[in-house]
Image (cartoon, rainbow, N blue to C red):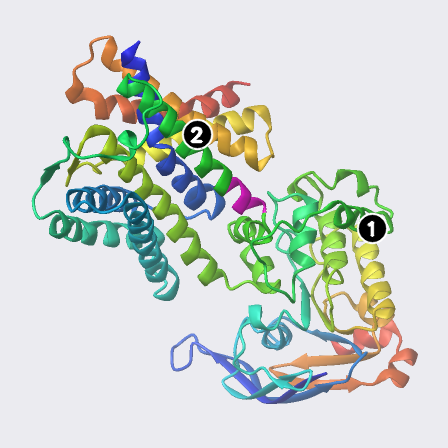
């Protein structure tokens, strides 16, 4: 589903503040895999995720998504495959727009946003039903600006928005880093359910080793722009949280 | 009475600028001051085409196209060259002065004997009242058009662009393109104000746009104060309040003149008035 070949990235090349974020890295992620990426700050994991998302381009190598060469395709061109959840829970939704408007845009992620009014009664009902399934009591507040909700609620809704339109890949960039423990757990559980239900290919970047141990089918540790460890499904199931801590020892 | 009727007519004419500033400043969150230039551009295009006896529909289209081109240029400079929006606006506005002077050929062009939008139909014999009806219809159509646009899927994407850029890009919208279109719409609306005012006052003038951006800002700030105060989320009501803001603004100016303030002081009164509207809610909330 995602194939990265010999990708590398250097920021501020040739300047005193030059940073080598990724060096000649290759990675293949198959359809339906849920890959968790861990690594210390500056290990290149976010750079890697952003290259899949299309917010930064590689210096070398190629990015292939769903069989298409996407190396030079910007983020808005990759939305036909990819939905994203941001580290900042406020980034994934438009604060001044109603919940309904946010969902309307999400329902058109892979399509053109045309000059017709798409928010009809059946769409409103669909959104209410989907939100009701979250069990957060937000289904009666769909006309409210989404900015009036808490970060945890907004992050959970962003997750739900990702499957409003056809979705193949879900990118989660430290989705719970800014949330309280309870909201964080709710968001992670919702993400896991959606990934299984829709058979999504997913990448989760996280610093939370408990989440890294509990979720995903494959785990990758990164360091200095390289893949240090790559544990496939069968062995990951046996991996204990304590062993993960030792990786960072 | 006639005095306030004129103020109302002016307010309706400036609805275009108010909508334009509302779109650039409130919806896209971009401080765009191409306004002074695109307003005058609308005026001079109207003036020159009227003196060449061109049909009304052509003048209207030409004004919209000219304003849109000016706004798109600011948008391109801002997004593609990554230049601060304020500076991009100033650059285009400055360049437009020469463009406007070239189009007009001189600094002032009287149009008094020519048939205008306001003499197309005669609903009433009093010219001012007749203008009021035509202007009301025109502005109502404009409001409906913008309101509809903002309710469409494209409009929702426009509103999201000013809110969270990472989000809307992740949802497949080219935000650069969206901002260019947004500034084009905003300045087309501004040019429409120039189009209306020129026909209303019966002349086009190269300096008619000086400081006109403050009218748009003032109207939008009045509207915003009301929107926040009444906690309005409806797009339609917001637009109606922006329109009301434009009219209130002209009434305040008319009132200032009617109590005998020196017309030379009008700009300072305008500036102080806008300052008061901006400052008052902040001062009261600090005391609370």
Residue where numbered disc 2 is placed:
B243
Majority SS type along the magenta span: helix
| Chain ID of residue with mark 2 | B
Is residue B220 at all visible to an observer of this figure?
A: no
Q: Quadrant of the C terminus of chain B?
A: top right
| Residue A107 picture location, percent across and down | 70, 58
* B19 w.r.t. A220: above or below: above
Q: Residue furthest right?
A: A238
Q: Residue at x 47, y 48 (%)?
A: B28
| Residue A126 picture location, percent across and down | 80, 51
Q: Residue at x 28, y 12 (%)?
A: B2
Question: Can marks 2 and 1 be said to lie on one chain?
Answer: no
Q: Residue at x 30, y 26 (%)?
A: B10
**Image position of A33 (left or right of B272):** right
* B99 w.r.t. B260: above or below: below
Q: Nearer the viewer, residue B102 or B199?
A: B199
Q: Quadrant of the N terminus of chain B?
A: top left
Q: Find residue A164 and report its image quarter.
A: bottom right
Question: From mark 2 to mark 1, how far is it between C-alphas?
Answer: 46 Å
Q: Nearer the viewer, residue A149 or A130?
A: A130
Range drawn in magenta: B146-151
Q: Find residue A67 and report its image quarter.
A: bottom right
Residue where numbered disc 1 is placed:
A182
Is residue A115 at all visible to an observer of this figure?
A: yes
């Amino acid at each position: 589903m995602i194939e990265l070949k010999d990708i590398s990235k250097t920021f501020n090349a040739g300047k005193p503040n030059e940073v080598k974020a990724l060096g000649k890295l290759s990675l293949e992620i198959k359809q339906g895999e849920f890959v968790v990426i861990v690594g210390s700050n500056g290990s290149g994991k976010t750079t890697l995720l952003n290259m899949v998302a299309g917010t930064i381009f590689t210096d070398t190598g190629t990015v292939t998504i769903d069989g298409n060469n996407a190396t030079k395709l910007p983020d808005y061109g990759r939305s036909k495959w990819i939905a994203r959840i941001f580290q900042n829970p406020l980034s994934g939704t438009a604060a001044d727009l109603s919940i309904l408007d946010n969902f309307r845009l999400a329902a058109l992620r892979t399509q053109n946003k045309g000059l017709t009014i798409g928010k009809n009664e059946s769409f409103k009902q669909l959104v209410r039903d989907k939100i009701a399934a979250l069990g957060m009591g937000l289904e009666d507040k769909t006309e409210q600006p989404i900015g009036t909700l808490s970060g945890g609620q907004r992050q959970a809704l962003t997750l739900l928005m990702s499957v409003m339109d056809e979705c193949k890949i879900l990118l989660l960039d430290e989705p719970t880093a800014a949330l309280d423990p309870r909201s964080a757990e709710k968001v992670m559980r919702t993400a896991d359910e959606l990934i299984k239900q829709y058979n999504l290919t997913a990448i989760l970047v996280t610093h939370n080793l408990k989440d890294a141990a509990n979720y995903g089918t494959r785990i990758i540790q990164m360091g200095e722009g390289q893949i240090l460890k790559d544990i496939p499904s069968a062995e990951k199931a046996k991996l204990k949280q304590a062993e993960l801590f030792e990786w960072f020892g | 009475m006639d005095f306030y009727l004129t103020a109302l007519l002016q307010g309706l004419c400036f609805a275009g600028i108010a909508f334009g500033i509302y779109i650039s400043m409130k919806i896209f969150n971009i401080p765009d001051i191409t306004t002074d230039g695109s307003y005058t551009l609308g005026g001079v295009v109207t003036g020159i085409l009227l003196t060449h006896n061109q049909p009304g529909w052509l003048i209207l289209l030409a004004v919209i196209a000219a304003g849109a081109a000016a706004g798109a240029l600011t948008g391109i400079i801002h997004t593609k060259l990554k230049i601060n929006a304020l500076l991009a606006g100033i650059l285009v506005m400055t360049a437009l002065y020469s463009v406007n002077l070239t189009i007009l050929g001189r600094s002032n062009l009287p149009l008094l004997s020519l048939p205008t939008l306001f003499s197309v139909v005669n609903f009433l014999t009093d010219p001012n009242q007749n203008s009021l009806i035509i202007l009301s219809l025109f502005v109502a159509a404009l409001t409906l058009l913008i309101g509809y646009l903002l309710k469409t899927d494209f409009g929702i994407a426009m509103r999201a662009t000013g809110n969270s850029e990472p989000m809307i890009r992740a949802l497949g919208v080219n935000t650069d393109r969206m901002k260019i279109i947004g500034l084009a719409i905003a300045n087309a609306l501004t040019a429409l104000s120039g189009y209306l005012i020129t026909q209303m006052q019966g002349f086009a003038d190269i300096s008619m746009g000086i400081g006109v951006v403050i009218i748009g800002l003032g109207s939008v700030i009045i509207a915003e104060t009301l929107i926040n105060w009444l906690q309005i989320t409806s797009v339609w009501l917001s637009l109606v309040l922006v329109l009301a803001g434009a009219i209130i603004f002209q009434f305040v100016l008319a009132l200032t003149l009617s109590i005998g303030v020196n017309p030379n002081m009008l700009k300072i009164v305008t500036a102080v008035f806008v300052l008061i509207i901006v400052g008052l809610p902040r001062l009261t909330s600090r005391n609370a």
